[in-house]
Image: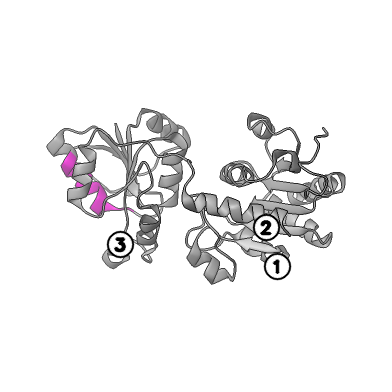
């Protein structure tokens, strides 16, 4: 099952509508948490918000996580070790206060198990692949840098 | 529990984080240090044991809306500092970490704050509180480090 989450603060209809359309076209099984009590979609199951228990239950059945480029999405994917596709919100489309999700997406570019979709075509291609690798808290150059810096600071002063 | 430090001149490190994401990040950061040099402090029994850490202490969890708990945490933390006599105190938050840094600052120890990766747009409120008590203040986001006058030296994400 594909689990779509857009956080709890703002709806992200551009993403959820694309997913709805792709779910119809490719017969995908999708559950979306929309942050939008008034939302209605044709081809997916959805709810505005989830309780922690509902969330855990859905995550357990999830094969691919899709979300906005929020830190919560990424941390969840790395923790539960599932592939994650993120679409950054754009402040230019009124989807957020500023463009920090684009910065987050740039930061994540190239990380194992984290896939960035800026548009519908990429999203569609990613959802139809069956070789997505899981995200995880494995070492990255930035992580090694932080650990090395702190080690030097603690031991060499 | 006594474990020999990694060398006679090795610093004694006290690593503090409340349960949850803060604790998870602390563990990843402290993987950079020699295990024998680190004593962990957290707020939930079972967490240090689960990670296989041999030296640890537990303190009351607290936040800024729970002054009695914060006081209890402070007293417990002072006890931990007196027992362990750390040279360096490192924390990822939240309020129990601030308390540890303030006490460490009073004792003229070296103090390190690593703001949580979750704070991608703005420093955490406990991070802001901790700033004047930290020898080294890091954000895991370059823009946040810049805005707060702290440093960016890598990221777990």
Q: Quadrant of the C terminus of chain A?
A: bottom right
Which residue occupies 59% across, 52% down?
A: A148
Q: Nearer the viewer's eye, disc 1 or disc 2?
A: 2
The mark found on residue B132 in the picture is 1
Which chain does the residue under circle 1 lie in?
B
Measure how far apart labels 1 and 2 are at the Cα level.
Answer: 18 Å
Instruction: Inspect this view and state whether residue A23 appears.
Output: yes
* Residue at numbered disc 2: A153
Say whether disc 2 or disc 3 marks the residue closer to the N-terminus: 3
Which chain does the residue under circle 2 lie in?
A
Which secondary structure type mostly characterizes the magenta part of the structure? helix
Q: Are marks 1 and 2 in contact (CB under 8 Å)?
A: no
Measure how far apart labels 2 and 3 are at the Cα level.
Answer: 38 Å
Q: Are marks 2 and 3 in contact (CB under 8 Å)?
A: no
Please check the rendered image and state whether residue A18 is part of the magenta-colored stretch, yes or no.
yes
Instruction: Inspect this view and state whether residue B59 appears.
Output: no
The mark found on residue A90 in the picture is 3
The mark found on residue A103 in the picture is none
Seen in the picture, residue B46 relative to A71 is either above or below; the reply is above
Q: Position of residue B93 (x, y in %)?
A: 64, 52
Q: Position of residue A138 (x, y in %)?
A: 47, 41
Q: Nearer the viewer's eye, disc 1 or disc 3?
A: 1
Measure how far apart labels 1 and 3 are at the Cα level.
Answer: 35 Å
Please check the rendered image and state whether residue A52 is part of the magenta-colored stretch, yes or no.
no
Residue stretch rendered in magenta on the structure: A11-22
Which residue occupies 76% across, 50% down?
A: B68
Q: Position of residue A117 (x, y in %)?
A: 26, 51
Callout 1: SS: helix
């Amino acid at each position: 099952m594909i689990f779509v989450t857009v956080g709890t603060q703002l709806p992200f209809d551009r993403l959820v509508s694309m997913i709805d359309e792709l779910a119809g076209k490719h017969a995908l099984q999708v559950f979306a948490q929309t942050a939008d009590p008034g939302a209605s979609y044709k081809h997916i199951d959805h709810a505005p918000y989830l309780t922690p228990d509902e969330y855990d239950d859905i995550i357990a059945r999830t094969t691919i996580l899709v979300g906005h480029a929020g830190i919560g999405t990424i941390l969840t994917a790395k923790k539960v070790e599932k592939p994650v596709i993120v679409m950054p919100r754009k402040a230019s489309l009124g989807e957020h206060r500023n463009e920090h999700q684009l910065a987050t997406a740039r930061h994540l570019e190239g990380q194992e198990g984290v896939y960035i979709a800026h548009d519908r075509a990429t999203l569609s291609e990613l959802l139809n692949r069956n070789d997505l690798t899981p995200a995880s808290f494995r070492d990255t150059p930035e992580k090694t840098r932080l650990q090395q810096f702190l080690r030097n600071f603690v031991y060499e002063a | 529990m006594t474990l020999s430090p990694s060398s006679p001149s090795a610093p004694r490190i006290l690593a503090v984080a409340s349960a949850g994401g803060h604790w998870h990040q602390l563990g990843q950061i402290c993987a950079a240090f020699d295990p024998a040099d680190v004593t962990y402090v957290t707020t939930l029994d079972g967490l240090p044991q689960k990670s296989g850490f041999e030296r640890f202490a537990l303190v009351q969890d607290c936040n800024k809306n729970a002054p009695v708990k914060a006081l209890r945490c402070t007293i417990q933390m002072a006890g931990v500092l007196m027992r362990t006599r750390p040279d360096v105190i490192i924390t990822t938050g939240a309020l129990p970490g601030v308390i540890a840094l303030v006490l460490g600052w009073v004792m003229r120890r070296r103090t390190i704050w690593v703001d949580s990766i979750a704070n991608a747009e703005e420093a955490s409120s406990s991070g802001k509180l901790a700033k004047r008590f930290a020898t080294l203040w890091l954000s895991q986001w370059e823009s946040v480090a810049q805005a707060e006058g702290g440093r960016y030296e890598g990221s777990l994400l």
